[in-house]
Amino acid sequence: MSLPPFDHSNQFKFTEAPNPTWSYCQKVDSTPLGRAWLEGEAQGWKIINTAEHNPVDLYKLMISGIVPRPIAFVSTISEDGVENLAPFSWFNMVTNWPPLVSFCCSNGPARIKDTTNNVKNSKGGFTVNIISEPFVENANITSIDAPPGFDEWSISGLTKAPSVHVKASRVKESAFSMECELFQAIDIVEPTSGECTTTLVLAHVKYIHVRNDMLTERGTIDLTKFKPVARMGDITYVRVGDAFRIPRAVWATEENNIQEVIQRL
């Protein structure tokens, strides 16, 4: 399949929300966009019983529907000192205090992933790095199904940078890296077979490395410079396009307005 070249000129920008005039209790079909969206319901729904669905097909369906997914680029080190680097898109923030992030490593069928073993067994900690557009190909190659003990750093073209607290290296090219210690590893067991299919890692973030040029005056990350990427279904990646801001309503200031609208219904 022939694809157009990557558009390096595309710039992240903020726009209005899809329906900036939305008000309390307004139905989805009140806008042309909403009506067009609801027309698809005419084709009905497919209901899938996960217990009867092929696990491989279920995986393909779920990763294409639960999107976009941020990517944890995890650097670990084994008890023997062999370093490992791998991306995981079952990843997210858990809480800011204590600062925890989570990622999942699927197990097998051939073997337990090096990352799982390293995180569980190593006392040296690990790092979780965020991937940006300029080195996404470098990061992607580390997902190769290499044999146990292979150091993916050696083929990535990426640079090891020392951490200040853990033994594992961080990725120097990453503008946002977290030094982590294992908070908890939870083996996910399939109820019927008893097979451990996945390990959920809760990582305690001890130190964060942020490039100064990525920070705004408010101390947050500037997405126009950060250019993070995320995973979609199959082998598809996605970058951040247009963004919009929607204020979060506060009950103390909105209660009267809400009650008035409800009374008119």
Image: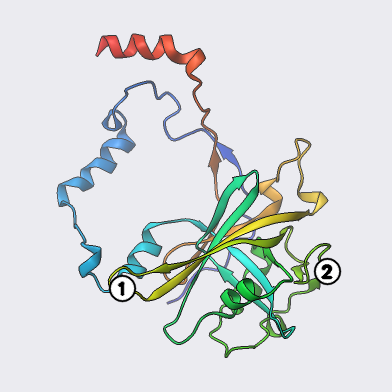
- How many other residues sit within 10 Å of disc 1, few (<14), some (14-19) or many (≥20)? few
Say left or right for 245 vs 194. Answer: right
Examine the image and state in which quarter residue 124 appears: bottom right
Say left or right for 262 vs 233. Answer: left
- Using the image, determine if residue 104 lies above or below residue 265: below
Say left or right for 89 vs 133. Answer: left
Q: Return the residue nearer the eye: 145 or 197.
A: 197
* C-alpha gap between disc 1 and disc 2: 40 Å
Residue 78 position, x and y percent, is: 69, 80
Q: Residue at x 57, y 74 (%)?
A: 116
Residue 161 position, x and y percent, is: 81, 69
Q: Amino acid at mark 1?
A: Pro
Give SS at disc 1.
helix
Question: Which quarter of the figure is the C terminus placed in?
Answer: top left
Q: Amino acid at mark 2?
A: Pro
**Residue that numbered label 1 is attached to:** 55
Question: Which quarter of the figure is the N terminus placed in?
Answer: bottom left
Q: Are marks 1 and 2 in contact (CB under 8 Å)?
A: no
Q: Along the polypeptide, which appears first: circle 1 or circle 2?
A: 1
Q: Residue at x 21, y 61 (%)?
A: 48
Examine the image and state in which quarter residue 126 appears: bottom right
Residue 258 position, x and y percent, is: 38, 15
